[in-house]
Image (spheres, rainbow, N blue to C red):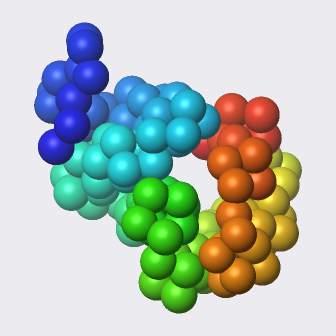
Amino acid sequence: MVLGRGDSLGALHDRDAALTLGRERFDRGHHFAAHEAWETRWRVSTDPDERRLLQGLIQVAAGYYKALEQRRAASAARLLGRGLAKLEACAMGPGLVDFCAAVRASLEAVEQGTLTTAQVPRLGTTRAV
């Protein structure tokens, strides 16, 4: 687990803290670190809807990590598809709908291995979580 300055495991077990920290890391392009923040909360959550949302976010973050850092287009596209399926199964507000649409729009570039950081949607601007 990668904790930043001021992070603690106890704080990450709090739903809002984990969502916020993950969103901030995701929007800064730290996709693996966002995945870790959300996974910490996912491990302790017992609410099926929250777990689905978190798992979707985790898979999307991991997909972008694989696309941008590992350059593994096929596995990145699979993870993004799985994450989108989970997110789209959630009760979605407008922010999450916009985020999912933006992720879907980036899929062609992911599949072709041409994704740039500028093509990765941000959660903060969509207010998805």
Q: Where is residue 110 in the image (x, y as percent from the top left)?
A: 66, 74
Q: Quadrant of residue 17?
A: top left
The answer to which of 58 and 13 lies nearer the viewer is 58
Q: Residue at x 37, y 50 (%)?
A: 32
Q: Quadrant of the N terminus?
A: top left
Does residue 103 appear left or right of residue 41 in this picture?
Answer: right
Q: Which residue is drawn at 78% across and 41% down?
A: 126
- Report x, y in % for residue 20: 49, 30
Tell whether 39 sits left or right of 25.
left
Q: Number of marks in the image? A: 0
Q: Please, which residue is most extreme toward the top here?
A: 6
Question: Left of 121 or right of it: where is 16?
Answer: left
Q: Position of residue 67 (x, y in %)?
A: 53, 67
Q: Is residue 16 visible?
A: no
In the rendered image, the vertical position of residue 78 relative to residue 50, given as above or below: below
* Residue 16 to residue 7: above or below: below
- Residue drawn at x 49%, y 70% is 71
At horizontal 64% and vertical 75% (from top left) the residue drawn is 113
